[in-house]
Image (cartoon, rainbow, N blue to C red):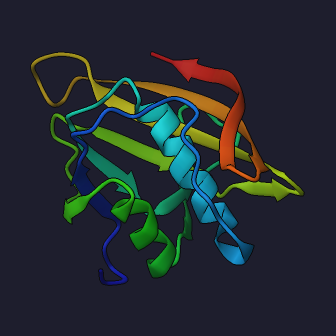
Amino acid sequence: MGAAVRFAVCTLSVALAAGTSVHAQGPTEAGAAEIVAARYVLEHHVSVAIYIDSAFARAEDAPGGATSAFRGIARMRRLVTAFGADATSSDPGNGVYLVLSDPVLRGDSADVTITVWYPTGSSKLRRGYETLALTLVHDTRGWTVRRKVQLGIS
């Protein structure tokens, strides 16, 4: 995955369970928190193409727009691999498009803002969004979403 690649696409074909945990140690905790947050938001968007923006979203902002700060290649690869990435593209088409903030880690908790853009009709140009502020907690099982606040929806 080259540095110029901004979006990643993958096909999600398995049901995602609420409360999914990912184990993490050390510096990968932010990446693990991102994976759990994305799975939580995507539980209603299964069996569609998923596009993940490598740029971080603005925290606590709806709809979450991309900033000029980007995830590192290894971290982006880990996030995309968690959803079975198989290609790259910058066109969300009829899939969902995710923009996640950089998780803010505080001890055993993390705050992540995530916006999911999704198709709202037969035209790929018609899109709706939902932005959530999630608080995750980390325990011996991994990261789990404990609180969500809806910041915006169309």
Q: Nearer the viewer, residue 62 or 19?
A: 19
Residue at 64% x, 71% y is: 28
Q: Residue 151 is drawn in which quadrant?
A: top right
Residue at 59% x, 63% y is: 31
Q: Nearer the viewer, residue 61 or 41?
A: 41
Q: Nearer the viewer, residue 132 or 31?
A: 31
Which corner quadrant holds the C terminus?
top left
Check the image and name the residue furthest to the bottom: 2
Check the image and name the residue furthest to the right: 107
Kindly tell me whether residue 65 is visible in this rendering: no
Residue at 20% x, 36% y is: 48
Residue 49 position within the rendered picture, expressed as x and y whole percent measured from the top left: 21, 43
- Say if 88 sits above or below 58 in the image: below
Residue 67 position within the rendered picture, expressed as x and y whole percent measured from the top left: 56, 58
Residue 19 position within the rendered picture, expressed as x and y whole percent measured from the top left: 58, 33
Check the image and name the residue furthest to the left: 122
- Say if 84 sits above or below 110 in the image: below
Residue 88 position within the rendered picture, expressed as x and y whole percent measured from the top left: 20, 64
- Say if 58 sits above or below 79 in the image: above
Which corner quadrant holds the N terminus?
bottom left
Decide if residue 48 is on the left or right side of residue 65.
Answer: left
Decide if residue 128 is on the left or right side of residue 59.
Answer: left
- Say if 6 sits above or below 150 in the image: below
Kindly tell me whether residue 86 is visible in this rendering: yes
* Numbered disc total: 0
Decide if residue 87 is on the left or right side of residue 80.
Answer: left
Residue at 58% x, 21% y is: 152
Q: Residue 92 is drawn in which quadrant?
A: top left
Q: Residue 125 is drawn in which quadrant?
A: top left
